[in-house]
Amino acid sequence: MPSFPQFNPLRLRSYILRLPLCTRVLLAVMVALYVATIPLAWLRDWAALEPDKVGLASLYRLNTFPLMHIGFFHMIFNVIALAPLLERFESEFGTLVTLVLFTGPFGLLPGGIYILLEKFVLRSNTAVMGASIWVFLLLSSEALKTQKSNPNFSIGPYKIPTWTTPLILIVLTSILVPDVSLIGHLCGAGIGYLWASGWIKFLVPHEKILRFIESKLNLLGRLPHYVSVDQKTYGRYGVLPTTAVPLGTMPRSPEQGQRLGP
């Protein structure tokens, strides 16, 4: 008889308790907003990204639509899919960067592009909501980074470029799941590709500013589960951590070393 992994609530609890600060706050807001819509159903219409209702007084919709969901299963599936991706992002770039991007450009940019396509290209007014736009944003970012070490994967005799994986998932999701927004998911994936390629890294405040804010407010000491700019897992731009080793204990080469990279 094959053995199947059993659900362990203690392991799930341990995972949730290890989530970094911004990740747990954003996930908690999604759950709280869903609970709030049970007695206050009008909140969905207030938060949804509906092109004809977006104006100067309602630009907040560009930030609220990823946090709002249509129903329980819509919310819970997005929370489960987003949690590991967002945790990885925050561990790599820090809590402040994650907060700035996911309460600002990562909602404004894909949402703005979606509105332009809906109103001026498709001539439609389809309202969207849900964190799946962030899921595909982060998936496309991860796929483009993985492309460097693993350019393609094989399906039978075919070799598929790794960076296309999110696009394949978007198409399959649009076919298999009713009432999902193909255009919205593509907008999210597009921003993810731009982020991973470095084209929109300028949206992040300079590291000196982030360090000043952290030290001035003592965020690392005051906030539990806070990820500092100086304590990220991979470094802000993918720099590997180093360990101080006494020079006398390091093996030496008789030839002069050569620097790699520019």
Image (cartoon, rainbow, N blue to C red):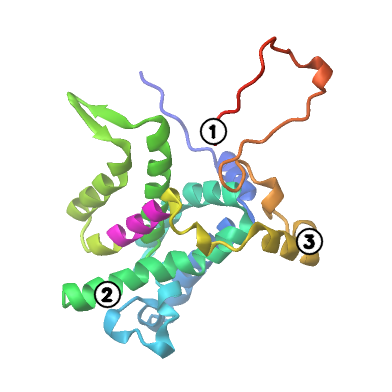
Residue at x 28% of width, y 43% of height: 164
| 177 w.r.t. 57: above or below | above
Crowd band around label 2 with a 10 angstrom C-alpha radius: few (<14), some (14–19), many (20+):
some
Give me the C-alpha separation between circle 3 and circle 2: 40 Å
Helix, strand or loop for disc 2: helix
Amino acid type at circle 2 is Leu
Q: CB atoms at circles 3 and 2 under 8 Å apart?
A: no
Residue corresponding to mark 2: 116
From the viewer's perspective, is the residue at label 2 or at label 1 nearer? 1
The residue positioned 38% from the left and 58% from the top of the image is 191
Quadrant hosting residue 257:
top right
Looking at the rendered structure, the kind of residue marked 1 is: Gly
Quote the CA–CA distance across marks 2 and 1.
Answer: 41 Å
What's drawn in magenta, residue-wise?
185-194
- Label 1 near label 2: C-beta < 8 Å? no
Q: Please identify, in this view, whether the residue under mark 3 or under mark 1 is nearer the observer.
A: 1
Residue at numbered disc 3 = 215
Residue pictured at 60% horizontal, 63% vertical: 205
